[in-house]
């Protein structure tokens, strides 16, 4: 492929095209069938150019120069005027704020019934619930031994009933968890694990932990 040099009017062989960096994304190479021979071992690739130069990129602003701001009353005055231009002062007796009053409510403190998100206590686990009920029964028993009144005996009986109810409720929750586990592992075709849980629930094949607990209760 020959081209004519506009400066010297001489014909020159074109081996490649130099493209400025900012135009390179706009150059689309053609398929191999569009290659042209220049009468030698060189090949020339035809190209389609759609010049779309990128615009000037905005440079991110750096951090403000606080030292210059603190030492320049003019900058401070300009900034104060700019901030005041963004705000609209309400006249006396004007429209109320979104809080329903003339001023926002006072900031709530953790001590006046307000609990921060990080202060929320997690729910008690089964072992913690059992321990709390046992402690309550023990305190009621000591009170009954010390006082020996009908009220203390009634409190002891109520604490025992609450302890038994807690045991039954936790046992029911654990049973439902095992049932859900059986359904899950059976749906995933983990039959061995499913039968293991079923045997533990039915008592046909107790786990080693349950056997140890039963032996400890018999010794106690």
Image: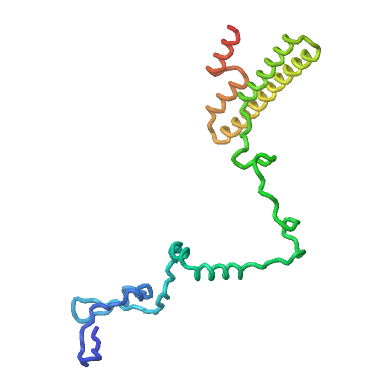
Any part of residue 70 in sight? yes
Instruction: Establish if 92 lies above or below 32.
Output: above
List the single residue furthest toward the bottom: 9
Any part of residue 63 in sight? no
List the single residue furthest toward the top: 219
Instruction: Establish if 167 lies above or below 83.
Output: above
Closer to the camera in the image, 103 or 5: 103
Q: Is residue 30 left or right of residue 74?
A: left
Q: Is residue 4 left or right of residue 56?
A: left
The image shows residue 102 at horizontal and vertical percentages of: 74, 58
The image shows residue 213 at horizontal and vertical percentages of: 57, 14
The image shows residue 39 at horizontal and vertical percentages of: 20, 81
Closer to the camera in the image, 111 or 30: 111
Q: Place residue 43 in its image quadrant.
A: bottom left
User: Which residue is pictured at 62% across the width and 35% down the height?
Assistant: 121
Q: Place residue 143 in its image quadrant.
A: top right
Q: Is residue 56 left or right of residue 101?
A: left
Quadrant holding the N terminus: bottom left
């Amino acid at each position: 492929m020959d081209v004519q040099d506009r400066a010297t009017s001489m014909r020159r062989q074109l081996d490649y095209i130099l493209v400025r960096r900012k135009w390179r994304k706009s150059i689309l190479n053609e398929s191999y069938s569009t290659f042209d021979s220049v009468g030698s071992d060189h090949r020339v690739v035809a190209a389609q150019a759609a010049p779309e130069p990128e615009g000037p990129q905005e440079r991110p602003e750096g951090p403000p120069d606080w030292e210059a701001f603190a030492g320049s009353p003019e900058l401070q005055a300009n900034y104060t005027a700019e901030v005041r231009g963004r705000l609209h002062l309400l006249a006396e007796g004007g429209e109320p704020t979104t809080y329903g009053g003339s001023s926002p409510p006072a900031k709530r403190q953790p001590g006046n019934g307000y609990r921060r998100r990080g202060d929320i206590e997690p729910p008690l686990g089964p072992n913690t619930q059992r321990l709390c009920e046992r402690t309550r029964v023990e305190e009621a028993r000591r009170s009954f031994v010390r006082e020996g009144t009908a009220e203390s005996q009634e409190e002891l009986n109520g604490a025992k009933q609450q302890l038994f109810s807690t045991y039954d409720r936790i046992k029911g929750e654990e049973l439902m968890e095992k049932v859900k586990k059986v359904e899950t592992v059976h749906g995933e075709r983990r039959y061995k694990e499913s039968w293991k849980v079923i045997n533990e629930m039915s008592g046909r094949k107790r786990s080693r932990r349950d056997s140890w607990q039963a032996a400890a209760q018999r010794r106690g």
